[in-house]
């Protein structure tokens, strides 16, 4: 469970503004992740995308976010897919691509009946004016 915990801790640290500590935990989690641990691998790509976005490395952030979606779509975990779409939307700089990612998150979260992720996507869409 360590790799998953490290990646989740990296996300929490990032949300609190502790960017350097988030990077450290992300790297530690990635180094210990098994090649078949799709939940942790996708989560790591999502957190990496967010961290790269904070660093202003938007092309790399988008690439990491899209990789997370590619991997998440290979699983049947709809919540994981919705979270990946939300994280991609978080690094896209407005426009139709951001709206597309948020609409995808809303659709997938709705299929899962994950009201929290659906509400998050809905709120972010309303902020865009969609």
Image (cartoon, grey):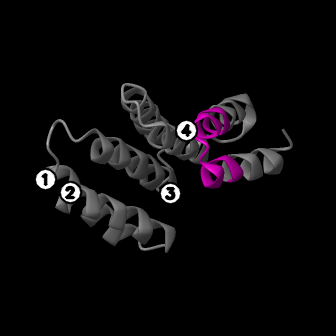
Element class at badge 1:
helix
Going from N to C along the chain, the mark reached first, 4 or 2, is 2
Q: Earlier in the sequence, mark 1 or mark 4?
A: 1
First to last magenta residue range? 105-119
In terms of secondary structure, what is the magenta stretch mainly?
Answer: helix
Q: SS of the residue at dot 4? A: helix
Label 3, secondary structure: give it: helix
Question: Magenta stretch containing residue 89, yes or no?
Answer: no
Q: Badge 4: few (under 14), some or many (20 or more) residues near its Cα, within 10 Å?
A: many
Q: Count of labels shown?
A: 4
Residue where numbered disc 3 is placed: 54
Identify residue for label 1. Answer: 32
Question: CB under 8 Å between callouts 2 and 1?
Answer: yes
Q: Nearer the viewer, mark 4 or mark 3?
A: 4
**Sequence-earlier tag: 4 or 3:** 3
> Percent x, y for residue 122?
75, 47
At horizontal 41% and vertical 71% (from top left) the residue drawn is 13
In the rendered image of this protein, does residue 20 appear above or below residue 57? below
């Amino acid at each position: 469970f360590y790799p998953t915990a490290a990646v989740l801790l990296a996300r929490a640290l990032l949300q609190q503004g502790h960017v350097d500590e988030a990077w450290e935990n992300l790297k530690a989690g990635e180094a210990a992740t098994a090649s078949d641990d799709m939940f942790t691998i996708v989560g790591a790509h999502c957190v990496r995308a967010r961290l790269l976005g904070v660093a202003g490395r938007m092309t790399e952030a988008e690439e990491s976010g899209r990789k997370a979606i590619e991997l998440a779509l290979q699983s049947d975990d709809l919540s994981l897919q919705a979270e990946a779409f939300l994280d991609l939307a978080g690094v896209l700089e407005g426009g139709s691509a951001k709206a597309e990612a948020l609409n995808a998150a809303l659709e997938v979260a709705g299929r899962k009946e994950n009201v929290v992720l659906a509400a998050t996507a809905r709120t972010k869409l309303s902020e865009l004016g969609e």
